[in-house]
Amino acid sequence: MNLQYPSILLEKAIDEFAKLPGIGRKTALRLVLHLLRQDRASVDAFGNAFIQLKHGVKYCTVCHNISDTDVCQICSNPSREAATVCVVENVRDVMAVEATQQFRGLYHVLGGVISPMDGVGPNDLEIDSLVKRVEEGVVKEVVLALGTTMEGDTTNFYIFRKLAHTDVKLTMLARGVAIGDELEYTDEVTLGRSIVNRLPFNALP
């Protein structure tokens, strides 16, 4: 039997929180009641932060990372090595690699990996824009830093084939990252070593 809420407004707020990943209705109730105990200014600031995020956030026109400007801080930083581009699945992976402080190049965020079971094909990802970046001639090395899952390996091979007509150097993370691991859950030391000891893509079995 469903819990009967004393307020329709309360129930609506709980419904919205419960839509978030990993948030059940009991946790949603606890979060909503916590917000109700806060002063109005704090709750307004909380809500406005998400409204401003949704309406104001941009995606970098170069690498597709989340940004406050048309070109993100990493791509616009002249001290970064523009000749090396690290290809990652999502924004969280950019943050994971940056946390290692072992990579000084630029990034390219695909927005996912090829996964036919989930209805995600190459055209749904930022692969064509990666090919265009390489074809411009500035990029000399592409580091494939996707998760070591079947979908990640499939995407790696597809990119390998798409870039076969160029003379760019293709490398990938050393397999210090365990098979089947998602990049964002890998500890910084292991991920850092995998970046430093990256391998030529076509040298792998």
Image: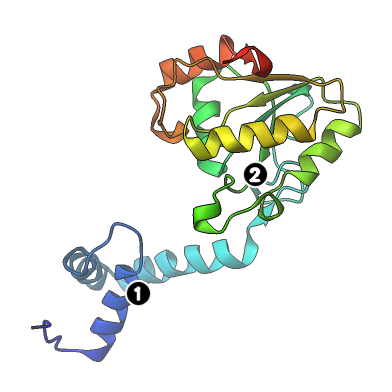
The image shows residue 119 at horizontal and vertical percentages of 56, 59
Q: Is residue 182 above or below residue 58?
A: above
Residue 7 or residue 120, whichever sits in front: 120
| Residue type, numbered disc 2 | Leu
Instruction: Specify the label residue 110 is tagged with.
Output: 2
Q: Secondary structure at mark 1?
A: helix
Residue positioned 56% across, 43% down in the render: 91
Q: Residue furthest front?
A: 205
Q: Position of residue 17 (x, y in %)?
A: 32, 69
Can you say which quadrant of the picture contains the C terminus?
Answer: top right
Above or below residue 144? Residue 89 is below
Residue that lies at the very extreme toward the top in this rendered image: 197
- Which quarter of the rendering shows the N terminus? bottom left
Q: Amino acid at mark 1?
A: Glu
For marks 2 and 1, the one nearer the N-term is 1
Place residue 131 in its image quadrant.
Answer: top right
User: Where does the image place residue 7, in percent across and percent down from the top left?
Assistant: 20, 89
Q: Is residue 88 visible?
A: no
Closer mark to the observer between disc 2 and disc 1:
2
Q: Which residue is mark 1?
A: 16
Residue 108, x across and y down, in percent: 69, 37
Please give the name of the residue rendered at 77% of the width and 39% of the height, measured from the top-left corner: 130
- Secondary structure state at the residue bearing disc 2: loop
- Name the residue: 19% across, 70% down: 29
